[in-house]
Amino acid sequence: MLTEKLVRRIIGDLQKSVQIKVYRDQKMLEFVKELSKIIPLEYEFEDEVERELKLPAIEIKGSNLFFHTIPKHSELETFLFALKIVSELEGEIKRSEVKILTFVSPFCPNCRYALDSINKIALKYGFEHHIIDVTLFPEIAQEKGVYGVPTTFVDKIVLRGALGERYLERLLVSSLRGEYYDYVVHKLERGEIEDLKSLEKPEIFAELMAHENFFVRLGAMALIENILKNGKKIGREAKDRIVKLLEHRDKRIREDAMMMLGMVGSKEDISLIERFLGDANLSESAREAIEMIRDRYED
């Protein structure tokens, strides 16, 4: 139950009135009406769904924050905290084309921590943040491949679980600039390789074949194999990085690079591989790589 004592305990007083817009849902409207009796809110109702996701929502106007939920439990604390932050902002919030979707549930122990961090980042950069309650919209969660909360989608990246604010900001901002190295390492270290299969960055995967973490190396090779399995070719930059690994000080990495060169190489690469036939550590791998290339081109 929404009480003044509960609201005051979470946020105290708002510095100024905050404007709210409710889309379509009467229960969301009733929640906002009750809250407006406790703290300074101005609200309006639109009998249409929110335009981006075509869902009912509570929008904190001027903030780019949309709550597709009736805030309660951990969601309530996040919503109130967002109101407090917005009430303290000065000037206009910049707007970005970036859309963030975070899936949560009312009793999720880590969701508030995740949402508070993402909301701060969204307000800082002008990102549009949509918070979606999986208990209200399970079909959307299923369509997006959500199997746990919190789960966040931003452009090509998927982040599962709660992360520290600075670390999260670094992953988001670097990935949005097209720099996916840290994100790929993060996912492979957590065993979340499935989320990376649509991110075709073979040059990064090739570089990670020399990573200190065995599971990152293993995952990187699996991702290159997945690209090949889908009938696509590996570009020159990625292949050059694999070739460079043939000189790596670690014998295991040299062997992995030779095996991978056999998978991605062309007939023009055979002469390069033949130079390693006299290497006691790589001769067997080199022969196998040459056979793989010849078999592929004979077919």
Image (spheres, rainbow, N blue to C red):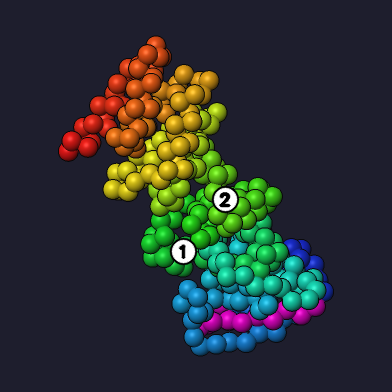
Numbered label attached to residue 218: none
**In the image, farthest residue toward the top:** 280
The residue carrying mark 2 is 179
The amino acid type of the residue labelled 1 equals Thr
Residue highlighted by disc 1: 135
Question: Residue at coordinates 53% horizontally, 71% vertically from top-left?
Answer: 68
Q: Secondary structure at mark 1?
A: loop
Expressed as whole percent of the image width and height from the top left, the position of residue 83 reads: 71, 71
Q: Quadrant of residue 239?
A: top left
> Percent x, y for residue 57?
54, 76
> Can I make out residue 268 in this image?
yes
Image x and y of residue 240, in percent: 45, 37
Q: Is residue 102 above or below residue 268?
A: below
Identity, as a three-letter code, of the amino acid under mark 2: Glu
User: In the rendered image, which quarter contains the N terminus?
Assistant: bottom right
- Please state which of residues 295 and 69 is positioned toward the viewer in this rendering: 295
Can you see residue 76?
no
Left or right, 200 with reference to 4: left
As drawn, is 119 to the left or to the right of 153?
right
- Residue 70 position within the rendered picture, expressed as x and y whole percent measured from the top left: 56, 71
Q: Residue at x 38, y 21 (%)?
A: 275
Could you say which is closer to the camera, residue 119 or residue 34? 119
Q: Which residues are magenta?
A: 16-29
Q: CA distance from mark 1 to mark 2?
A: 34 Å
